[in-house]
Image (cartoon, coloured by chain):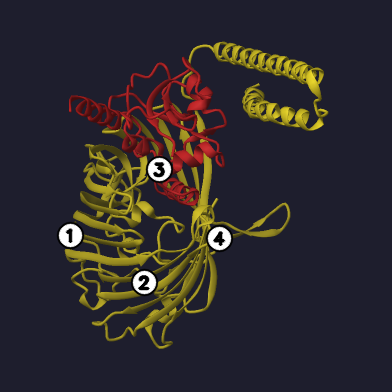
Chain colours: A yellow, B red
Amino acid sequence: MLLFLAGGTAVAQEIAPASESGEEDASTESAQSAPVPSGDSGDSRVEAQQEAQQKEIEQLRADLEDLRARMDEEDEIDFDEMGASSEFEPSLDVYGFMAFYAGKWFIQEEDVMYGIMQNKFTFGITDLNIYFSGHLTETISSLVELRFTFLPNGADASFIPSYERVDNTYMDNSTSEELTLGGVIIERAKMTWQPYDFFGVSAGRFLTPFGIWNIDHGAPVVIPINKPYLMLRHTLPLNQTGLVVHGRFFPAASTYFDYAVTLSNGRGPTEEIYDLDDNKAVGLRLRLSYEGQDVGFAVGAYGFFGHTTDVTKAPGFAGEDGTTLTIVEEITERYQELAGSADILFRLWNFRLQSEVAGGYLKYRVRPLVVLPIVNVESPSGEYQPDFLRYSLYVLAAYEIPIVSGDDAMSLTPFVMVEYDVMYDSLPEYDTWIYRGGLNFRPNSFVVLKAACSYVRLPDAPNIADIWTLAGQVALTF
Amino acid sequence: MTRLASVVTVLAFVLAVAPVARAESPRDILVVVNRASTVDSVTIDELRDVFLKKRASWRSGGKTTPVNASEGSSLREDFRKRVLNMSSSAEKSYWQKRKIKAGESRPAEFENTLRAVFKLRGAVSYVYRSQFKEGTARVVLVLPAG
């Protein structure tokens, strides 16, 4: 009915000019076809014809007006039949993104990194994220983002004392087929109540609201292929489980001031589901941005304070007679962490400059044995982990060159990026410089093809040579 | 001299009034809200924020539910140019990023936006003046044609 009436209106609109031009055509045609008048009888015959035509035109106009009036009436009835305005209707959107990778790390064979990093030309699926975004009422929404991975199958499980690889291959008893299991990472699973722009509450698992990369986080959105070290090292926790109070203010046109206060389990081996201590982690995010047509900028900062605890459990006996069975917790690691980040984003027409710095100071109360970096194995010499400071920063510059504008826009985006990473200050030889450069091609808004190379240098590590990488990626939103 | 002064005064008045008394055009875009809405007027900046989901409430209070005209329609294209200042592909790209970053979906689309606004409390949309029917929605902003 709705379509019919919309179409009907269009028809009516088309009828009007048609009748006007029809009037013109009719008079022209009658003038052409009428015989050449001769004398008074000819004049009177022409006048009679004109009078008849005029009546016909007036009748057609009246019919048209009548038709319009009837259509309007029908339209009114239809609007009235719809009754009172209805409320918000719930909706659920399912979508996602994925990325295909091809690349190689060029590492000297005698280097310790050769066996640790990927040293063969390889293909891979690096991202496969699915979203379930629900809008339940005007103020209540939910968001679940799942990241599918082939891990842990194939991961290096240990190097010392002997090499082991995780093998998640199992046989299906009914078919004897060998199947390899992958994993699912719950990136986000949160419900949000947002009664006002300036105040909302989210509960569940959320992305830590720091920086630029952790919010962008999807391969089709971020510009380079590889994550910066401040993301890889988890200088700040990338996700947390708990509560966020957040909101936005509008100090001026196209200007936004955002805040978020986080309260969570913080870090820990089981932080997704339960906390191993009673000290909750707190964080505060502030961000000011201006998003004009040609120019934009944003400055933001996030501060995080929390405690991390790990425990083991063992059976024991308690009570006056020592016969009551208990499970005794023993703390094996506990540290206090003060961490933060700052980020800036500047955009001038198609030029983009962004930078982030993140760092954290870790102070131990219960020290574990030192773990060797990268291979994640306890130090053979058995010393205890000292307090340490770690930080990381990057600067990224990119320029988007439109190839075709308009609805079929394509673009090329060359970029360069420099990173500096201090894994922690008690391991100075692992300070790392990374230089990246590349070119992205976006044939449409759904797909981006990336090519990039990187140069990694650890100037203070005598036993680690410089590393080159070449990579390509196709990222797609669906 | 008095007559000349009168003519000049009249001319000045006509010139001053002329832009204000601009003729209405069927291609004017009327921004409309549901009749139950308490919003009286909106600015283009505010409207842009609402349709890009950078804000979910009006300055004067009340939640917003933006409703777009169907993709590919001339009304949608006109609105995009006049309010969002972006091309169709730029808008698509914007929503791809918003979906990934914030889980935010683009506004719903309707062929007949006036009906959607009539039906849905909190809805805000737009129609050409030629499509508008008095009493079905409240006009909060007029975007002149051209």
SS at badge 3: helix
The answer to which of marks 4 and 2 sits earlier in the sequence is 4
Residue type at the position of mark 2: Val
Left or right: where B2 falls relative to B11: left
Q: Quadrant of residue A3?
A: top right
- Vertically, is A377 above or below A71? below
Three-letter amino acid code at the position of disc 3: Leu
Number of the label disc, if any, that sits on residue A375 = 2
Question: In what element is the residue under mark 1?
Answer: strand
Q: Which percent across, then down, holds residue A439?
A: 44, 70
On the rendered structure, is A9 left or right of B113? right
Image side of residue A275 versus residue A94, left or right: left
* Residue to which mark 4 is pinned: A168
Kindly report the distance in space between the C-alpha atoms of the residues bearing marks 4 and 3: 50 Å
**Residue occupied by mark 1:** A361
User: Can residue A189 be seen?
Assistant: no
Give the quadrant of residue A356.
bottom left
